Image: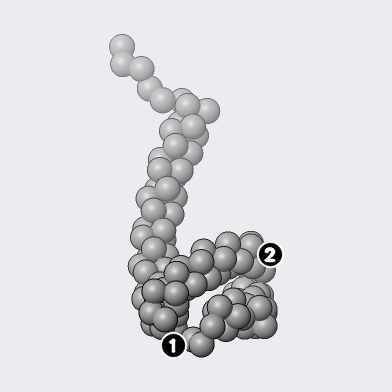
Amino acid sequence: MMATIQGNDRDALADKEQLAAVRIAVDEVDDQIVTLIARRERLIRIAGTLKGDDAEVRAPGRVERVIEHVRSAAEKKDIDPDIVESTYRAMISGFIELELKVHKESS
């Protein structure tokens, strides 16, 4: 006699399959995000060669304008602006360090 998948077992299997599909989709989104970060990095490297000094690189006013912009964009897309802000603050911090290095090398 062959065993069959019943009730809770079937639900558990469906959940595992759904989770696997979600993970694949997340990986695809991550690949897209990395592509966009690479594009942003190329632009930051250019900007680093165009700025006059470290203060212009750090540009706290510009950072806050970027944060305001992405929080607003998040709200319009009905996603959590706090997550977007914390992600951007971490990313901007890393890019400022890169830009300072690029600026120093080009000066």
Q: Residue at x 40, y 43 (%)?
A: 20
| x then y, percent, for residue 15 | 48, 39
Outermost residue to the front: 107
At mark 2, the secondary structure is: helix
Q: Amino acid at mark 2?
A: Asp
For image coordinates 47% across by 27% down, the residue present is: 9
* Dot 2 alpha-carbon crowd within 10 angstroms: few under 14, some 14 to 19, many 20 or more: few
Looking at the image, is 8 positioned above or below residue 32?
A: above
Q: Where does the image place residue 88, in percent across and percent down from the top left?
A: 58, 68
Q: Is tag 2's residue or tag 1's residue first in the polypeptide sequence?
A: 1
Q: Out of 74 and 60, give the one closest to the viewer.
A: 60
Q: Say few, some or many: other residues with alpha carbon within 10 Å of mark 1 (under 14 / 14 to 19 / 20 or more).
A: some
Residue annotated with mark 1: 50
* Of the pair 21 and 107, the residue shown nearer to us: 107
Q: Position of residue 32 (x, y in %)?
A: 38, 65
Q: Quadrant of residue 49?
A: bottom left
Q: Which residue is mark 2?
A: 82
Number of labels in the image equals 2
Q: Is residue 83 visible?
A: yes
